[in-house]
Amino acid sequence: MEKILTFNQLDILAEKMASYVEKNSVIALIGDLGTGKTTFVKKFAKAFGIDENLKSPTFNYVLEYLTGKYPLYHFDVYRLSSGDEIYEIGYEDYINNDGVCLIEWANIIETELPKEFIKIEFQYDGDETRKVSLSYIGNAEKEREMLEYVGFSN
């Protein structure tokens, strides 16, 4: 489902997603530079109970935050040239490790994402808004539940 959201509404979406996710959830964040992926992660992490100042893991690929509701693994795979390179940084150790993975630039590793994951796409819509597409890949029932929970359903 797609909606036009203000930055305040994006913050609210991040907070709702933080309370919605379960252990082993993967959130794939897709969008051009400056569309709000890292800002979304920061708001999500704060609502998730992480007090640390989140940084973009561009040069580390993944940063771990262990003080929240569950462990939070923040990936930025912008610098990978192919999906299979994700395994060189221990990707499989994070995916089913009772935490939550947020993956910026997830389209680069789309072939390596699990069978079920949450996909959030950000697109420019104006100076104060973004077009946001939200879906739960691989599970239509979970998608309906999620869209309703975060207030994204019609």
Image (cartoon, helix red, strand yellow):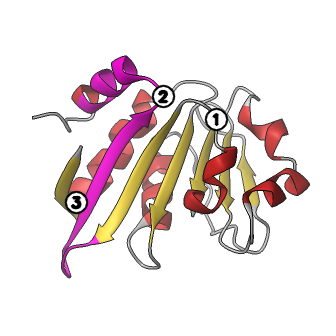
* Residue 76 position by quadrant: bottom right
Q: Amino acid at mark 2?
A: Gly
Residue closest to the eye, 64 or 151: 151
Between discs 2 and 3, the one toward the N terminus: 3
The magenta-colored residue range is 124-147
* Residue 97 position by quadrant: top right
Q: Which mark is residue 8?
A: 3
Please state the horizontal and vertical placement of residue 136, each as a whole percent of the image.
41, 34
Residue at 18 percent of width and 79 percent of height: 126
Q: Are marks 2 and 3 in contact (CB under 8 Å)?
A: no
Residue 13 visible here: yes
Please state the horizontal and vertical placement of residue 86, each as a whole percent of the image.
79, 55
Residue 104 visible here: no
Q: Is residue 140 left or right of residue 54?
A: left
* Residue 114 position by quadrant: top right
Residue topped by disc 1: 114
Q: CA distance from mark 1 to mark 2?
A: 9 Å
Q: CA distance from mark 2 to mark 3?
A: 29 Å
Residue at 35 percent of width and 63 percent of height: 122
Between discs 3 and 1, the one toward the N terminus: 3
Q: Is residue 107 above or below residue 47?
A: below
Quadrant (top left, top right, bottom left, bottom right) of the C terminus: top left
Kind of element beneath mark 3: helix
Q: Are marks 1 and 2 in contact (CB under 8 Å)?
A: yes
Q: Would you say residue 74 sits in the magenta stretch?
A: no
Q: Amino acid at mark 1?
A: Pro
Residue topped by disc 2: 138
